[in-house]
Image: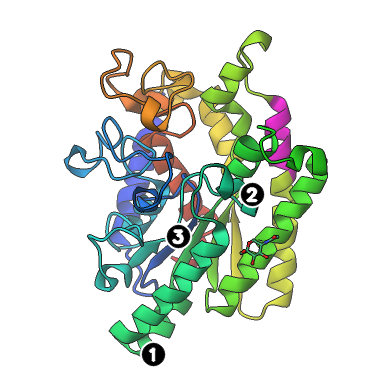
Amino acid sequence: MGIPVIFLFLYYVACLAAASPNIPAVIVFGDSTVDTGNNNQVGTILRSNFRPYGRDFFGGRPTGRFCNGRLAPDFISQALGLPPLVPAYLDPEYSIEDFAKGVCFASAGTGLDNATSDVLSVIPLWKEVEYFKEYRRRLQRYAGKAEAMRIVGEAVYIISIGTNDFLENYYLLVTGRFLQFTVEEYQDFLIDRAEEFLRAIYWLGARKISFTGLGAIGCVPLERTTNALAGGGCVEQYNKAARGFNVKLQELIGRLCATLPGLRLRYAPVYDGLLHIIANPSSYGIENVDRGCCATGRFEMGYLCDELSPFTCPDASKYVFWDSFHPTEKVNWLMAKTTLETSLAEFI
Ligand SMILES: *[C@@H]1O[C@H](CO)[C@@H](O)[C@H](O)[C@H]1NC(C)=O
């Protein structure tokens, strides 16, 4: 049963050897699934720049990644022959020299809907785009106009967003969206926001774009906990909302590719892969699928994920989830692999 993991590892090493000179940078937009530390510089309580976050990262260092280790874009960057991590744009330890090879504008807790980023005072998606514009100007000053435009045009873009619009906004009933829209209408509203965003970065020069579909959002431990009276299983209503969104997202991608010349926008499917891990954990060397490693794993994330909790698991690689909301490094690596094999395959 351990064979798939060994196979995946060999694949990963092979990828590392096949560095692509055509891809000068990885550029990231989205939420906590891909935020490598921007929230550290923002006035929000949604933080993770303290232990035990980062305990399996280089030097055991917490960075603001909501994980024990690295996120999917870090693995993707390394597999493309670029640095082994993608720096957060707001991190003062990095400069434009670093960002020329990869930059992350993502913010944990944000969404496609402006109202979602308001819930926890994080960076709205439109502001991520403003930072991207500023980045382009800095890149031009640093590398010259022609080289800056080459980097922006040849870079691979990773977009991962939408979970919070459902779990931290719509279904949490905190913003009124639940009263304003049916689920189908809200999916359409989010797809319209995704279209605005994608057109904006297209006009700013982005071409090779991977948009990650939603995962099985009803299976995160926090949602299982709220479902405890019904047996603690995945919340099917939320998974169904995610699947419906994914169908509409793929339609949008087809439509935009047909209308915007030169756009190579691709869909990264992670929903089925995540469910496969949850249904067949032992093939991945995993023993726990329904609780996070950190603390009791039932509801903790951010500051509640306390270093002193005696319940925190010793080996996160045996878990699907690191905290009650976010996958472990191992699962992030599996999702990076899926992305490299699907949406990014033609660019490598
Ligand atoms: C979101 O907020 C930005 C900035 O205020 C605004 O430009 C944009 O129109 C808003 N989007 C929607 C759908 O309201």
Q: Which one is earlier in the sequence, the residue at label 2 or at label 3?
A: 3
Residue at 59 percent of width and 24 percent of height: 223
Residue linked to disc 1: 145
Q: What residue type is labelled 2?
A: Ala
In the depicted view, which residue is nearer to us: 72 or 97? 97
Task: Report the predominant secondary structure element of the magenta stretch.
Answer: helix
Q: What element carries label 3?
A: strand
The answer to whether residue 197 is left or right of residue 189 is: left
Question: What segment is highlighted magenta in the picture?
Answer: 236-244
Mark 3 in CB contact with mark 1 (< 8 angstroms): no
Q: Is mark 2 on a helix, strand or loop?
A: helix
Classify 116 as above or below 285: below
Q: Quadrant of the N terminus?
A: top left
Residue 101 magenta-highlighted: no
Q: Which amino acid does label 1 sit on?
A: Lys
Q: Which mark is residue 28?
A: 3
The percent position of residue 144, horizontal first and vertical second, equals: 33, 89
In the depicted view, which residue is nearer to us: 121 or 346? 121
Please say whether residue 2 is visible from this viewpoint.
no
Badge 2 local density, few (<14 within 10 Å), some, or many (20+)?
some
CA gap, disc 2 and disc 1: 36 Å
Residue linked to disc 2: 115
